[in-house]
C-alpha cells in the first residue's frame, strides 16, 4: 500500500532525527515526538486520512506514538512556457495566472516531506 510505505519512511526519518538530536544534546534528551509537520506535494495522490491512520499504527511503541500530524499541501513551482512567468500552483489547475496559457512546466510535486517536528524533553516538565 502506497500510504503505508510512505508512513514507514517518514517514521524512520523522524526517529532518526530524534536520535541524532539526542546524540548532540545529551543534557536535554528528547523523549517523545509530539507533532510532525509534513508537506504534501500538489500532485501526490496520498490520502491524508489514510496516511495518518497508517502512521498511527506504525508509530505504536515508538517515541512517535500519539504524535500529531500536521499535513499541508505544498505549492508547486511552475514556469510558463509562453510568457516565462514563474509562479506557484496551489490547485491542480494548470493555467498561467499571467497570460492564461496552458503551456506550463514544473518538476516534482509528488512527494511527502518532513518539514519539522516537535519533541518533548524527558526532564523539562517536572517541577
Ligand atoms: Zn504565461
Image (cartoon, helix red, strand yellow):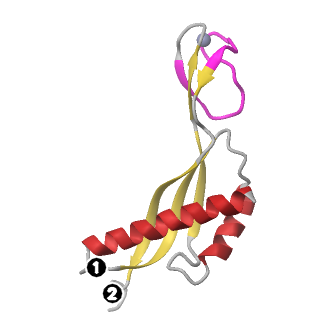
Where disc 2 sits, the SS reads loop
2 and 1 marks in contact (CB < 8 Å): yes
Residue shown at 57%/30% (left/top)? 107
Overall secondary structure of the magenta stretch? loop
Q: Is residue 4 above or below residue 58?
A: above
Q: Position of residue 1 (x, y in %)?
A: 75, 60
Q: Position of residue 123 (x, y in %)?
A: 33, 87
The residue labelled by disc 2 is 123
In the picture, measured across the screen, residue 38 lies left or right of residue 47, that is: left
Q: Quadrant holding ligand 1?
A: top right
Residue situated furthest bottom in the rendering? 127
The residue sitting at 58% across, 35% down in the picture is 108
Could you say whether the residue bearing mark 1 is in a helix, strand or loop?
loop
Quarter holding the C terminus?
bottom left
Dot placed on the residue nearer the N-terminal end, 2 or 1: 1
Query: How many numbered marks have been drawn onto this rendered protein structure?
Result: 2
Return the residue nearer the eye: 42 or 6: 6
Query: Camera-side residue: 105 or 1?
Result: 1
| Identity of the residue drawn at 40% across and 71% down | 18
Mark 1 CB in 8 Å range of ligand 1? Answer: no
Q: Which mark is residue 111?
A: none
Q: Vertically, is 112 above or below 104?
A: below
Residue 1: within the magenta?
no
Residue extending furthest top? 82
Magenta residues (range): 86-104
Q: Which residue is mark 1?
A: 28
Residue 29 in which image quadrant: bottom left
Q: In the image, 86: left or right of 93?
A: left
Picture coordinates of residue 34, whole percent (x, y): 50, 73
Amino acid at each position: 500500500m502506497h500510504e503505508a510505505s510512505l508512513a514507514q519512511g517518514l517514521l524512520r526519518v523522524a526517529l532518526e532525527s530524534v536520535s541524532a538530536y539526542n546524540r548532540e544534546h545529551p543534557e536535554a534528551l528528547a523523549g517523545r515526538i509530539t507533532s510532525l509537520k509534513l508537506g504534501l506535494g500538489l500532485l501526490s495522490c496520498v490520502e491524508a486520512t489514510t496516511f495518518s491512520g497508517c502512521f498511527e499504527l506504525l508509530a505504536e511503541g515508538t517515541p512517535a506514538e500519539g504524535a500529531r500530524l500536521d499535513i499541508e499541501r505544498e505549492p508547486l513551482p511552475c514556469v510558463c512556457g509562453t510568457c516565462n512567468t514563474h509562479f506557484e500552483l496551489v490547485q491542480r489547475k494548470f493555467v498561467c495566472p499571467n497570460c492564461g496559457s496552458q503551456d506550463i512546466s514544473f518538476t516534482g510535486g509528488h512527494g511527502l516531506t518532513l518539514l519539522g517536528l516537535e519533541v518533548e524533553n524527558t526532564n523539562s516538565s517536572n517541577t
